[in-house]
Image (tube, helix red, strand yellow):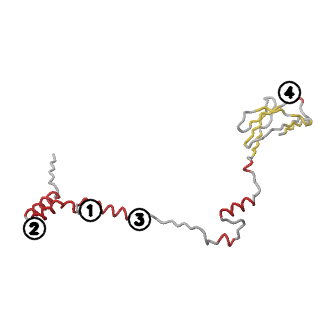
Amino acid sequence: MYYDVLGDAGQPTAALRASGPPHILVTAPGEASRTIPLEETSPGHYEAHIPAGQGGLYRIVSGSSELILPEAGFYREAEEMKPQAVNTALLSEISRVTGGRIHPSMDQLLNDRGSLVRERKALWPYWLILALVLNLLEVALRKGFSSAQYRGCGNVRRFHGAGSQHEKACLKSRCANLAPAAVSLTFR
């Protein structure tokens, strides 16, 4: 970082030298602010060397209220973000192990022989059929289309014969249970 300090006539100011050695305040990423002195390298020309060991944003301001300097900042990029040379030996080893290619031709890129192709299949028709079958099964069970309702009458048929009075009475009592009950509503 360097500053050129000149007076009105283009000459270095004596006021800067009279107020003591100039300094700047540097804020580094992840560190507390520190004061760095400006060194006069030639008349009216001051420099400061700022160690920037880590990546991030550095902010530089004047270290004293008498010395008015413009604020400055710079960003040091992290090493892994800088452009790197291509490691061809490593890439060829990776491609050999995984079955890939280095610098493939256009024909090799467009060749789909031996490539894995995934196909998506919609599952919603199967879920719909399952829901309809379960719905019909539930309706059948609710309406009494199962043989469980007439289980007791089978014993009557076995002991008294088909079409006996006991079988008719049993069926009549079962059917009476299925008939809707009379509902009486009173309005006032």
Residue 101 has which mark?
none
Instruction: Please name whichever residue, 52 or 9, is drawn nearer the observer in this view of the structure.
Output: 52
Tag 1 residue = 140
Q: Give the CA separation, mark 1 to mark 3.
A: 21 Å
Q: Left or right of 124: which side holds 85?
A: right
Tag 2 residue = 163
At 51% from the left and 65% from the top, the residue drawn is 120
Of mark 4 and mark 2, the one earlier in the sequence is: 4
Of mark 4 and mark 1, the one earlier in the sequence is: 4
Q: Give the CA separation, mark 4 to mark 2.
A: 127 Å
Instruction: Please name whichever residue, 10 or 111, is drawn nearer the observer in this view of the structure.
Output: 111
Q: Nearer the viewer, mark 4 or mark 2?
A: 2
Q: Nearer the viewer, mark 4 or mark 1?
A: 1
Q: SS at mark 3?
A: helix
Tag 4 residue = 20
At 16% from the left and 63% from the top, the residue drawn is 154
Q: Position of residue 13 (x, y in %)?
A: 89, 32
Q: Quadrant of residue 129?
A: bottom left
Q: Nearer the viewer, mark 4 or mark 3?
A: 3
Q: Amino acid at mark 1?
A: Ala
Q: Give the CA separation, mark 4 to mark 3.
A: 86 Å
Q: Amino acid at mark 4?
A: Gly
Q: SS at mark 4?
A: loop
At 85% from the left and 34% from the top, the residue drawn is 38
Q: Left or right of 175: which side holds 38?
A: right
Tag 3 residue = 126
Reply above or below: 83 against 68: below
> Are there few (<14), some (14-19), or many (20+) residues within 10 Å of tag 3?
few
Instruction: Please name whichever residue, 150 or 141, is drawn nearer the observer in this view of the structure.
Output: 150
